[in-house]
Structures are given as C-alpha cells and as structure tokens.
Image (cartoon, rainbow, N blue to C red):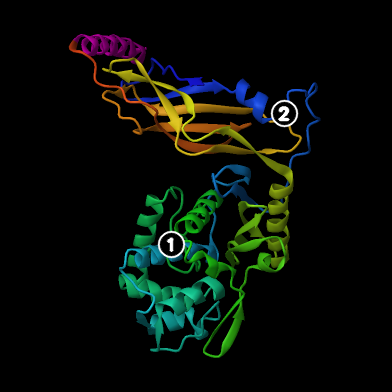
Amino acid sequence: MIVCRGNTGGAPRAMRSCALLVAAIVSFALAPASAQQPPPKKEEFQTAAPFAILIEAESGAVLFEKSADQPMFPSSMAKLMTAEVVFQAIKQKRLTLEDEVTISENAWRKGGAPSGGSTMYAQLNSRVKVHDLIRSMVIQSGNDACIALAEAMSGNEPTFATAMNKRAQEIGLTKSNFANSTGLPDPAMKVTARDLSRLARHLIREYPEFYPLYSEREFTWNKIKQQNRNPLLALGIGADGLKTGYTSDAGYGLVGSAVQNGLRLIVVVNGLKTAKDRSDEARKILEFGFRGFESRELFRVADTVGEVKVYGGTQGSVNVVATSVVKLLLQRGANEKVSAKIVYSGPVKAPVEKGQRIGVVKVWRGDHLSLEVPLEAGESVPAGTLVQRALDAASEFAIGLFRAGVKRI
C-alpha cells in the first residue's frame, strides 16, 4: 500500500503529492524473484519520424515518444477532430445520419474538384446525406465533405473551428488549436502528437458505432471509386484505423491503430519525407510495441493504492482505491525503473463518501509519465466532533503560519 502523508509546504488547498518508491511493485511486476542479475541494457528504440508517440489504448500508457509535445501542423489528421464534433452531435441527436446537406460553392471550390486536393467530388449545389459525407471524410479524406458538414452544423468554417477547439479542451487536448475542418494549411493550426493519440483513443472508446468506418477500404461517390489512404490496413498487422495526412509544411503523417492478441496500440507519426517513410515508420513503431512489451498488473479494481490526509474527520486519513485495473506495459528484458505518485488536492475535507473521486495515481517508466489512473475513497469518513474539527483547524492554522514564514524568505 502507498501511504501518502502530504506535504507541509503550500497553501491548505494546494496540490499535494506523495512520492512513491515502488520497490514492492518492481519486485512482482518487473522480474521473477529468481532473477540474480539485471539484464543487459537494450539499445534505445529509434525512429526517423521527427514527431512520434505510441500508446496502449486501454490505459493510455505511453510506450514510446519523441517530441510528442512539440507543436506541429496536422494536415488531414485534423479531420479526426472534425469527426469527433460530428459524432458527438449525432450522439446528442442534434444531427442525424439521414439529414441532407447542400454542397455550397465554398465547399465545392475549396474542397471539391476545382481544389486539386483530396475530395469527394460532390457536385455543386447537390444535396448529400450526412452518412455519405461522414464516409467520405473518413475513407476518402474529402475536404468538400468536411466543409459541408462544418457549414451544416455551424453556418461557416470559422464558427465550426471554434466548436472544435471548445470540444478539444473538453476531452483533454490541451496543446492543440484547430483553424478549419480539413487540416488545410493555416498558421494557426497546431497540434501535438500526444494530443492526436488522445483524440484517437477517445474516438475508439466513445464512438464504437462509427469507428469501423475507419477500416473500410474504399468508397464510391459520383461514380468515382477511391481507396482508403491508410497504408497500414493492407499490411496484415491488425490495423483498423485511422487517418493519414500530408501538406508540404507538415510532411507525411499518420494516426494509426492496430490490435494483436487482444492488445490495441495507437501510433502517431508526422513530419516524414515520403509516403513510404510514413508507412514504414508507423509499422516499425507498432511492431516494436507488440513484440517488445508485456503487460503487468499493478493494482486490481478496488485495491487500496494508498491513503491521503483528511481534515475535520473522525480519522486523519482515508484509503484511496483504483477505479480501474492499473496495468503497465513493460519492455521485455529491460531493467526499467518504475515510480509512482498519488496526487490530490488536500487535505480532503470531511465528510468523505465512499466512492468519492480523490486525485490520481501517476506512474512513470524511467523519466516518462506512462499512466494516470483516477482514485476514489475506499471508505466513508464522517465529520468529526467539534473538538476534532477544532484541533484540525488549529493544526492547519499553525501550518499556515509556517507557510507564510517560508514565503517571506
């Protein structure tokens, strides 16, 4: 069990963190008890992609990253965010698959046949059902389809981009900014590889009814058949999504996902020089993940992970438990250092209800934050007596005086 005592520095409601040296976890999770000598250090994995990340889809654990938080141009990978906004609108019944959308002159000129870019080849002023526009956006990367959907939902692309950014913040894409529905070049359009991996994971988890579209190999519209642009689908590696992208500024990029033996991985690469490089590097990173890692269970659901300080209760601390299985993919044969922290805002004020959300446990592989899992109270803690609350208040006041003194120094 991890015991988190808190930190006497900072304001009473300041963020507390409990550093954990996970020797116990390491002993059962990393190596058999009979191991006498640490295995030789393996060569660090390398990729030619300037930007890359590999995550495990179930937990979000990061297996590999390279410049994953550096801003980059997303090109057509931005259409994943367009898809999220559209899928959410359908889920909330603000839009239906049978609604018909008129292909405006703006959508036709900027994203249709006259544009010279990826297009559905929808005819000017024609009416197209939402489900066909979605299939074009997903399979053909149709710019005209994206613009038509944006105009149908928000009236124009700038207003739709505002909705994209609002939704991006809601789902945790904190370092990205979307300027249009297509990913066409715009100086204000920036994302990170980490945010794209989070977006892909979100789409897979939240929209299982739409995700199979990403594995469809072709789509025909206006008697023009077009193939899915994702090269991973034809490689026999279990790939079933998601999106490629290319502009001269961004280079060649891809957000991909594949499943092998029940394990789903998500890869993002960007900034590559050729389409072949994009395919080769994405495949190499996925194979590194599937072949080079094995799963270790750290905590089961409802296992006590540690305890956090309680203020004004019948007891001074409360056990916190994991809300889901805490598993970590660890590199085979590597002597990886694993560490963790319970992070919470506290002390937690009583009364505390069993199941109340209290902070997270963060797990690192080496220097990289690999996993973050929510924690909740494993038991209830009623409010204490007047005397107990007064003692806690006096304690917090004394700590506050000490903190004030530290700040003056």
- Of 215 and 336, the residue lying toward us: 215
Please tell me how crowded label 2 is: few (under 14), some (14-19), or many (20+) other residues with Cα within 10 Å: some
Above/below status of 337 relative to 137 = above
Instruction: Please identify the residue farthest to the left as the structure is shown.
Output: 386
- Dominant SS in magenta: helix
- Of 268 and 2, the residue lying toward us: 2
149 sits left or right of 333 in the view = left
Residue 331 percent coordinates (x, y):
70, 38
Q: Which stretch is magenta?
A: 387-409
Identify which residue is drawn at 55% across, 81% down. Answer: 116
Residue 298 percent coordinates (x, y):
58, 32
Q: Earlier in the sequence, mark 1 or mark 2?
A: 2
Residue 332 percent coordinates (x, y):
74, 38
Identify which residue is drawn at 44% across, 30% down. Answer: 321
Cα distance in 3D space between marks 1 and 2: 41 Å
Give the amino acid type for the residue marked by disc 1 in the picture: Glu
Q: Which residue is mark 1?
A: 84
Please tell me how crowded label 1 is: few (under 14), some (14-19), or many (20+) other residues with Cα within 10 Å: many
Residue 231: quadrant of the picture: bottom right
